[in-house]
C-alpha cells in the first residue's frame, strides 16, 4: 500500500507526559516568551523547565553557525542541485551525517535545510538551493538528506512551505496555484519528508498562497496537522511573521528571529482578551519542547542519536566524491574525456571561473570554507610537474568589484595578512578591535565580547594593500549607509550608499551598492587604506518593514579590491593563443553573484559578459575544447554543439578542483544526471514576475519535462535525467506485473548490460503515462529510479519501486487522491526522452 504519513520520531510516551508536565509549570508570559527567538540564531532558555538555549543555523551548502564570516569556517558541501544530480540517496544520506557532525561541532541544534521548493522556472534566483523540478526526485533526495541529518541528533528544517519558488516580491506576492498542482507537485516533497523522512521542523515561507500569507495560512493546520499528522515545529522564515492574532491562530509555532516580532506582549494581551485561545499557545510550546527533547536540549531527557565522527581528511574525501558524483557529462564527442594523462604535455585552463571558481550560491546558503580548490589548482596538482598547465581568465564577466582577496591585504603592523577592525563610539572612543582574515563583514546583534552594541557609532577597517602587479587598482566599499575611504592618509571619498527605489532589501544585502576609487601602484608597492562605515539604522530601515527589523540587528558591508587585468579583447586573444598551443583546452565558465543569488530572480539565462564569445574563439583554436559550466542552475549554451565536451559542474563545494581533475582524468566517473531540464532558449518559460502582487502558476502541472508534448513545449538543450558516463549501456528488458489493485506499490525490474570497456554507474529511470486518459495529465512523469553499477560486459538488474502515488491524481471534487482505472504505460531508460523499454500495467477499480 502507499506509505501514509506518520508522526515524526517522538520521545517515548512517558517523555510525552513529562513534556506536558513541564508545560504546566510555565506561566503564560513564560510560554509566550519561548515562542519568539532570543536573537538572530537562538531560542530562549527556560531554567524553570530545564530547557537550555537552542541554536539554529543556515544552511543548504554547509553549517554556518552563529557567525557569518571567516572566523567560523564551515565545510562547504555541493549545492542542492549538485546533490540531486547524483540521484543517489545513500550518498546524500551520508552527507547529511557529515552535516550533523559539523552542526554539533558548532553547537548547532537545528539546521535550516533542506530547501525543497521546485524548479518551476530556471529564472528562479534560488534554483541552486533547491533540488529539482521534479517532485519525486526532490522528495527522495530530501528524505535522504533529512534522515542523515537527524540520524546525527540534529533537527532538519524542511523549507519553504510552500510556493516560494521565486524571489521577485517574495515577501509579499501571492502565488496562485491550482489545487492539483499544489497537491501533486509543490506539496509532494514536504509530504514525503514529513511522512517517510519524519522531519522535526518546517519553515513557513514569506509569500502567500491562494490569498493567505503562509505564516497565517490554513494550509499549516489543514495539511501539516490534519492530513499529515505532523507533530513537529513550524517556524517562520526570518521576519516573515507580521501579525499577532492571525499568525497565532494559525499553526505557526515560532517567530524568528528575535527578540522583536509581532507576538511577545501583544500575544499575551490577545490571550488575556480571549482573542487567541491559550490552548493554541500550549500546543506551540509543547511542539517546541518536543523539538528540544529530540535534539537533547531538555535536562533529564537524553538523546541517543550522535553524529558520526569525521576527521578533516575523511570530510575532504566525502566532499570530493560527492562533487564528482553530481557532475553531469552532457556531451563527449569522440570520447575526448577522460583525458589520457600519459600523452599530455600542455593543457590550457582558461576562463573567469578557472582560478577563482564559485563553490556555492549567495544568500542564506553562504558559508566560509576552510579552503577551496579551484579548477586550476586541482588540475595542476593532479597532472604534476610533467605537464605544463597554462592559464588565462579570458573575460571578466562581473560588473561589480569583488571582495578584496586576502592575498593583497596586510595588517597595519606588518605582522601578516588581514585587516584590523575597530569599533568606535560617537565621540571617537575606541570600544574594541579585532583582527580579521577576510574583507566581508557581518555582525548580527553583537560586535563580539566586550563591545557594547548600542554604543558603536562607526566601524573602521584598517589595512595595507600590497600590489602584486603594477597597474590600476580599484579600491572601495559596498553596503548601505555612509562610507568613507582614505588612501595613504588622503580622503578618497565620503558617500552615502542606498538602494534604488523599490529594491528588495535582501537583494541589497547580497549585491550591495558600491563606491570605488582607483589608484596606480607599482609592483610590490604598499599603501595604507581605511574604510569607515557609520552605523545608521535609519539607512537600512528606510528600505521597508523588513529593513526596520534588520536595521536593528545587522551590520553588513565589504571592503572591495580589483587587481589590474587586461581588457576582454586582450584577455580573449591571450586565451586563444594559449588554447592553440595546448593539446587540450579546459574552459571554465559560469554565473556570478550578480545574476544568481538569493534575493532576486534572473532576468536572463545567458552566461554573463562575453563568455560565449570566449568559448567560441577557444573552440575554433582547439578542437579538443572541454567546457566546464560552473553555475547552480541552467544557462544557455549556444556553442554546445561546437565543442568536444560539456561538463555541468553546478556549485560543487570546496573540493571542486580536485573532483574536476578526478573526472577529467578518469579517476572518477561523472556520475550526475540532470535533475532539471536545461533549455535551449528562453522561449515559453514560466515567469517569476507578479502582476499586481499576484503570481499565477498558469503552467499548472506542466513544469519542466512534464510539459513535453504540449503545443508550447520547446525542445530543451538537454533533457531531464540526461547524463553520460565513461561507458555505454544496453537496456535489455523491463519486467512489471500485468495488473495491480489500485493503491498498491509494485516493483519493476530493468535489466541492463554494460557494453563498454569500463566499470560504470547508470541511473535507471522509469516514467509513467496514461494514454487516452480522461484526466488532464502530462504525457509522462517520473515514477521511479534506481542507481546500479556493473563491470564491462556485465548484465545487472535494477529493481525500481513504483509507489502507488505515482499512478494517482488529486481529485478536486472529493478532495482526495484517486486512481483512474485502466492501462498505464511504463517506459524505462536513461532520460525522460530516451526510453527504449516499454510495458503496460492494468490498474483495477477500487
Image (spheres, rainbow, N blue to C red):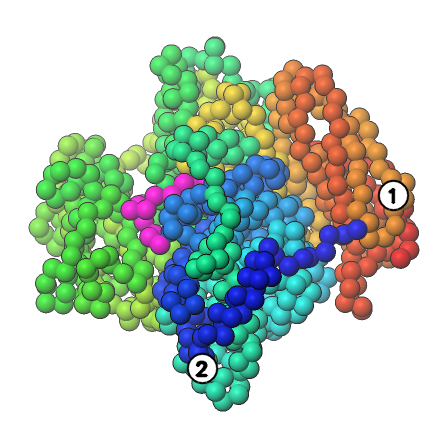
**Mark seen at residue 841:** 1
- Residue at (82%, 33%) from the top-left corner? 734
Q: Is residue 566 left or right of residue 293?
A: left
Label 2: few (<14), some or many (≥20) within 10 Å? many
Q: Is residue 527 among the parts visible in the rendering?
A: yes
Location of residue 212 with respect to 635 vertically, above or below? below
Residue stretch rendered in magenta on the structure: 66-81
Quarter holding residue 402:
top left
Answer with the quarter of the image where residue 840 lies.
top right
The answer to which image quadrant residue 377 occupies is: top left
Name the side, left or right, on which 198 lies relative to 596. right
Residue occupying the point 66% across, 63% down: 229
Q: Is residue 422 above or below residue 645?
A: below
Report the predominant secondary structure element of the magenta stretch. Answer: loop
Q: Eyeballing the image, is 652 above or below 500?
A: above
Residue 800 x/y as whole percent: 74, 38
Residue beneath disc 2 = 268
Question: Does 748 sit left or right of 317 as displayed?
Answer: right
Q: Is residue 315 magenta?
A: no
Query: Tag 1, which secondary structure?
Result: strand
Amino acid at each position: 500500500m502507499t506509505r501514509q504519513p506518520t508522526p515524526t520520531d517522538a520521545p517515548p510516551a512517558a517523555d510525552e507526559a513529562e513534556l506536558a508536565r513541564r508545560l504546566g509549570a510555565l506561566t503564560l508570559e513564560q510560554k509566550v516568551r519561548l515562542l519568539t527567538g532570543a536573537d538572530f540564531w537562538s531560542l530562549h532558555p527556560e531554567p524553570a523547565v530545564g530547557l537550555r538555549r537552542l541554536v539554529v543555523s543556515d544552511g543548504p551548502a554547509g553549517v554556518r553557525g552563529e557567525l557569518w564570516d571567516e572566523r567560523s569556517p564551515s565545510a562547504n558541501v555541493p549545492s542542492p542541485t549538485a546533490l540531486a544530480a547524483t540521484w543517489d540517496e545513500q550518498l546524500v544520506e551520508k552527507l547529511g551525517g557529515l552535516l550533523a557532525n559539523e552542526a554539533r561541532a558548532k553547537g548547532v541544534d537545528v539546521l535550516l535545510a533542506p530547501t525543497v521548493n521546485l524548479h518551476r522556472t530556471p529564472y528562479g534566483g534560488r534554483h541552486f538551493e533547491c533540488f529539482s523540478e521534479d517532485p519525486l526526485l526532490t522528495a527522495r533526495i530530501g528524505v535522504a538528506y533529512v534522515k542523515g541529518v537527524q540520524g546525527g541528533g540534529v533537527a532538519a528544517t524542511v523549507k519553504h512551505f510552500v510556493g516560494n519558488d521565486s524571489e521577485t516580491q517574495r515577501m509579499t506576492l501571492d502565488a496562485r496555484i491550482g489545487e492539483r498542482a499544489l497537491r501533486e507537485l509543490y506539496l509532494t516533497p514536504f509530504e514525503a519528508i514529513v511522512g517517510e523522512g519524519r522531519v522535526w521542523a518546517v519553515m513557513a515561507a514569506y509569500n502567500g498562497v491562494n490569498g493567505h500569507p503562509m505564516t497565517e495560512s490554513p494550509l499549516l493546520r489543514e495539511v501539516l496537522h490534519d492530513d499529515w499528522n505532523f507533530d513537529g515545529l513550524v517556524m517562520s522564515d526570518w521576519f516573515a511573521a507580521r501579525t499577532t492574532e492571525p499568525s497565532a491562530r494559525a499553526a505557526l509555532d515560532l517567530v524568528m528571529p528575535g527578540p522583536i516580532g509581532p507576538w511577545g506582549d501583544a500575544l499575551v494581551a490577545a490571550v488575556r482578551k480571549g482573542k487567541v485561545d491559550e490552548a493554541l499557545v500550549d500546543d506551540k510550546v509543547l511542539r517546541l519542547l518536543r523539538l528540544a527533547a529530540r535534539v537533547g536540549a531538555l535536562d533529564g531527557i537524553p538523546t541517543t542519536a550522535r553524529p558520526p565522527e569525521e576527521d578533516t581528511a575523511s570530510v575532504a574525501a566525502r566532499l570530493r566524491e560527492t562533487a564528482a558524483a553530481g557532475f553531469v557529462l552532457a556531451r563527449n564527442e569522440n570520447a575526448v574525456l577522460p583525458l589520457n594523462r600519459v600523452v599530455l604535455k600542455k593543457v590550457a585552463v582558461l576562463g573567469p571561473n578557472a582560478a577563482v571558481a564559485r563553490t556555492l550560491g549567495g544568500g542564506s546558503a553562504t558559508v566560509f570554507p576552510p579552503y577551496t580548490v579551484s579548477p586550476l589548482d586541482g588540475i595542476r596538482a593532479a597532472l604534476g610537474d610533467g605537464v605544463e598547465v597554462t592559464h588565462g581568465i579570458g573575460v571578466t564577466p562581473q560588473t561589480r568589484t569583488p571582495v578584496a582577496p586576502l592575498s593583497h591585504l596586510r595588517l597595519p603592523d606588518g605582522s601578516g595578512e588581514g585587516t584590523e577592525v575597530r569599533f568606535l563610539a560617537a565621540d571617537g572612543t575606541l570600544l574594541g578591535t579585532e583582527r580579521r582574515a577576510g574583507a566581508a563583514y557581518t555582525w548580527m546583534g553583537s560586535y563580539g565580547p566586550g563591545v557594547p552594541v548600542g554604543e558603536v557609532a562607526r566601524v573602521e577597517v584598517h589595512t595595507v594593500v600590497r600590489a602584486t602587479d603594477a597597474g590600476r587598482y580599484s579600491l572601495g566599499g559596498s553596503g548601505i549607509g555612509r562610507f568613507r575611504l582614505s588612501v595613504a592618509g588622503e580622503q578618497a571619498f565620503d558617500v552615502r550608499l542606498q538602494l534604488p527605489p523599490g529594491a528588495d532589501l535582501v537583494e541589497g544585502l547580497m549585491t550591495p551598492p558600491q563606491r570605488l576609487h582607483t589608484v596606480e601602484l607599482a609592483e610590490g608597492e604598499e599603501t595604507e587604506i581605511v574604510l569607515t562605515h557609520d552605523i545608521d539604522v535609519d539607512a537600512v530601515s528606510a528600505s521597508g518593514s523588513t529593513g526596520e527589523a534588520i536595521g536593528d540587528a545587522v551590520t553588513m558591508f565589504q571592503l572591495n579590491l580589483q587587481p589590474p587585468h587586461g581588457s576582454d579583447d586582450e584577455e580573449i586573444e591571450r586565451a586563444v593563443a594559449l588554447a592553440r598551443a595546448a593539446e587540450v583546452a579546459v574552459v571554465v565558465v559560469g554565473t556570478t553573484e550578480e545574476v544568481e543569488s538569493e534575493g532576486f530572480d534572473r532576468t536572463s539565462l545567458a552566461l554573463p559578459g562575453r563568455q560565449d564569445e570566449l568559448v567560441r574563439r577557444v573552440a575554433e583554436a582547439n578542437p579538443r575544447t572541454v567546457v566546464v559550466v560552473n553555475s547552480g542552475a541552467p544557462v544557455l549554451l549556444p556553442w554546445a554543439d561546437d565543442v568536444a565536451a560539456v561538463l555541468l559542474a553546478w556549485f560543487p563545494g570546496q573540493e571542486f578542483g580536485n573532483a574536476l581533475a578526478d573526472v577529467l582524468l578518469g579517476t572518477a566517473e561523472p556520475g550526475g544526471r540532470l535533475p532539471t531540464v536545461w533549455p535551449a532558449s528562453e522561449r515559453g518559460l514560466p515567469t517569476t514576475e507578479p502582476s499586481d502582487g499576484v503570481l499565477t502558476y498558469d503552467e499548472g502541472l506542466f513544469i519542466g519535462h512534464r510539459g513535453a508534448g504540449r503545443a508550447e513545449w520547446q525542445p530543451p538543450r538537454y533533457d531531464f535525467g540526461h547524463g553520460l558516463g565513461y561507458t555505454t549501456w544496453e537496456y535489455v528488458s523491463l519486467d512489471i506485473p500485468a495488473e495491480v489493485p489500485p493503491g498498491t506499490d509494485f516493483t519493476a525490474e530493468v535489466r541492463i548490460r554494460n557494453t563498454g570497456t569500463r566499470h560504470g554507474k547508470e541511473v535507471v529511470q522509469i516514467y509513467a503515462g496514461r494514454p487516452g486518459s480522461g484526466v488532464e495529465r502530462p504525457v509522462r512523469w517520473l515514477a521511479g529510479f534506481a542507481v546500479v553499477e556493473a563491470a564491462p560486459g556485465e548484465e545487472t538488474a535494477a529493481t525500481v519501486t513504483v509507489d502507488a502515488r505515482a499512478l494517482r491524481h488529486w481529485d478536486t471534487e472529493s478532495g482526495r487522491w484517486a486512481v483512474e482505472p485502466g492501462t498505464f504505460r511504463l517506459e524505462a531508460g536513461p532520460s525522460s526522452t530516451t526510453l527504449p523499454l516499454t510495458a503496460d500495467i492494468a490498474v483495477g477499480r477500487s
